[in-house]
Image: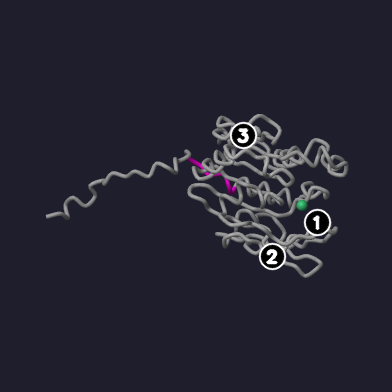
Amino acid sequence: MTEPIRVTVWGENVHEHEMPRVRELYPEGMHEAIAQGLRADLGERVQVRTATLQETEHGLTPEVLAATDVLTWWGHAAHEQVSDVVVDRVYQAVLAGMGLLVLHSGHLSKIFRRLMGTSCSLRWREADDREVVWTVNPGHPIAGGVPEVFIIPRQEMYGEYFDIPQPDELIFISSFTGGEVFRSGCCFYRAAGRVFYFSPGHETYPVYAQPEIRRVLANAVLWANRAGPRRAPTDMSFTPMGWFEGERS
Ligand code: ZN
């Protein structure tokens, strides 16, 4: 049997303590709901743990990251409280081959902005909106088993312009009742690492309980997991191999 993919689900874990509505929807925290979905959908293919902002080093010590194949990131209210040392550690781990799933308001997290190199800002409207998610890359592994189009009954509107680099692969776009559109599922390759941004997931709606959303996240974990050893992105030294020795006269 192949080794399970080691997933760390990171949660900011602030709204759950401050907003009764969020606590009601996610009594054990959004990170636990996301982790339980992955455990239920992927079974023995994954080994899932959680980490939160409040833990020492936000639960993302060098040891934890070295033992993480794919990290998921949900944050909103406390992006600036995430230590730069930890952000740099996550950044280096991604370049070396750790997968990263950035969820919803994580678009403004330090780690996502660092990996993108742009502001990552977008238009938004919090108004019990109806989001229609369209699959625009049905052959991609992240779209496997996901309907060509599905509805999230209640969501926050995220709209263009979304200030990111052009995605390496675009998997989903969304539309909203105001006519807005949004690139809601985007893949990026950064050195040896794979990054997937997925926008559905506002804290006051039960988005992470929806089967289509869970399917996307499970697929994304499998896609972002890069088999093989990590490579050190800083070790770029190279000695000529002597391939063309015979051509020299
Ligand atoms: Zn939100």
Tell whether 249 sits left or right of 14. Answer: left
The tag on residue 42 is none
Asked whether residue 226 is drawn in magenta, I would say yes
Q: Nearer the viewer, mark 3 or mark 1?
A: 3
Q: CA distance from mark 2 to mark 1?
A: 16 Å
Real-space CA distance between mark 3 and mark 1, rounded to the nearest whole angstrom:
30 Å
The label shown at residue 60 is 3
Label 1: few (<14), some (14–19) or many (≥20) C-alpha neighbours in 10 Å:
many
Q: Secondary structure at mark 1?
A: strand
Q: Quadrant of residue 199?
A: bottom right
Amino acid of disc 3: Leu
Give the position of the N terminus as an image quadrant.
top right
Q: Quadrant of residue 12?
A: top right
On screen, residue 151 above or below 75: below
Quadrant in which the C terminus appears? bottom left
User: What numbered label is drawn on residue 155?
Assistant: 1
In reply to whether residue 149 is colored magenta, the answer given is no
Disc 3/disc 2 C-alpha distance (Å)? 32 Å
Circle 2 or circle 1, nearest the eye? 2
Residue furthest to the bottom: 179
Query: In the image, what residue occupies the spot 62% across and 62% down?
Result: 137
Residue at horizontal 67 percent and vertical 33 percent from the top: 49
Tag on residue 160?
2
Q: Which residues are magenta?
A: 223-228
